[in-house]
Amino acid sequence: MASTSDTGVELAGTSLVGQRVLFGISGGIAAVDSVRIARELRRHGADVAVCMTHSALRIINSLPLKWATGIEPIVDWEGDMTQLEEFDAVLVAPATRNLLASHAHGILSSPLLMALTAARGKGIPTLFIPSMHSSLSEDPVTDELVELVRSQGANVVWGDEEEGRMKTPSHVDIVSEMAHLINAKKPLRKSVVVTLGATRSAIDDVRFVQNTSSGQTGWAVATHLHRMGHDVTVVSGATSSQPEIKLPLVINSESPDEMLAELLALANDDIDAWVHSAAVLDYIVKNPIEGKVASLQGSLEVELIEGKKHISELREKTTGACRIGFKLESGVKIQDLVHRAVAQIKNAGMTAVIANRLEDLKKLKAISSADIPSDLHRAHLVDANSEHWALKDERAVVEAIEVLIQRH
């Protein structure tokens, strides 16, 4: 729902709902992104209080942060210190080397350092996002400081090196890591493998047969589960979309056999849940040709044979795990869609199936979210008892999948 006030935000997710986050800002140049970070925290449901150092005020004044959060930032000891009394997590972005050193050695020269010390004493989740020139980040003393801070219970996440300095991650990535850090400590967090994207079967060395899948739904599932604190591994085929956030582990395998080999290897670990959203080819090329078939040679006949069903091949190695499949059909009634989903559940030993109709997906793609009729749904969740629930949109799909994983 859109906000009706200038300082309001539109809720993009629920990963931080009910969480009070203290957002600390020190004097790195990356403080210019602090408004975006504060707004992103609120978009995922957090209540945000801001505490700034005096050096941060030389980069950005407190007024934009008051607009971003609706609360006056704390800078001096004379500020509203009651904001520092109760919070669920602390995020410091950017974190300068000076601030890291002061915190590591117990210096209390500012309200922010006092709040960090209190958080350390209470075991409150704390995330530092350093930002500094590469000459500082490569200094062995910096490594020692970071390791000391980590040994004291905090998390430190670096961005990539660009233009001679360690840049901070994007505001979306920062808030995603904050949510993961908070939620990972909650009960019912699971290890999950998510497959996504399309698979390819080579005709020759430059041509291939491929089904259609952007990977968007799979990325949305993986992103949501990561934000909610689950341990997510992605096995990705070919995609035309990109994840919203930087996920911790993405394994690329575009052929059906390569993807299956990766999944069988992962099945040797203790995986709690499997989400099979990849569009795996039902038919693959029987005899791929080495090199490149010359052009202008007339017609080319390619023999296709039935490929292996990943969900069936994994059945014996995933006993006891939550297994969620996806099924796409076309030109069928909802009742028939449900029956086919139930058959897949029974044949492959699945927990549930997310069933879609191609025509519904095309209709949804062609209209805006505000114009979606009440009888048009993104998917249907089907279980082994033939019970099914309509899922209105992508958000409903990813949230339903998480509920299944947690309840299993």
Image (cartoon, helix red, strand yellow):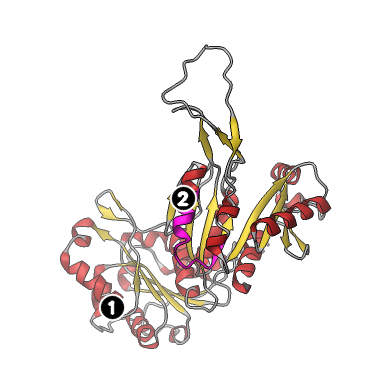
Q: How many labels does the image show?
A: 2
CB under 8 Å between discs 1 and 2 = no
- Name which residue type carries label 2: Ala
Q: Is residue 338 above or below residue 100?
A: above
Horizontal relation, residue 293 to residue 25: left or right: right
For this rendering, which residue is in front, 148 or 202? 202
The answer to whether residue 401 is magenta is: no
For this rendering, which residue is in front, 264 or 164? 264
Q: Residue furthest left?
A: 140
Q: Crowdedness of circle 2 by 10 Å Cα count: few (<14), some, many (20+)?
A: some
Residue tagged 2: 261
Q: Is mark 1 on a helix, strand or loop?
A: helix
Q: Position of residue 352 (x, y in %)?
A: 68, 62
Q: Residue at x 46, y 50 (%)?
A: 261
Q: Is mark 2 on a helix, strand or loop?
A: helix
Q: Which residue is drawn at 57% across and 25% down?
A: 302
Instruction: Please identify the quadrant where the C terminus is shown.
Output: bottom right
Residue tagged 1: 151
> What is the magenta range?
260-274
Q: Which residue is drawn at 18% across and 57% down?
A: 135
For this rendering, which residue is in front, 69 or 135? 135
Q: Can residue 224 be seen in this view?
A: no
Q: Which label is found at residue 64?
A: none
Q: Quadrant of residue 155?
A: bottom left
The answer to whether residue 262 is magenta is: yes
Query: Which is more N-terminal, label 2 or label 1?
Result: 1
Q: What is the spatial separation of the Cα atoms under label 1 and label 2, in whole angstroms?
A: 37 Å
Q: Is residue 48 above or below residue 290?
A: below
Q: Position of residue 348 (x, y in %)?
A: 64, 57
For this rendering, which residue is in front, 21 or 108? 21
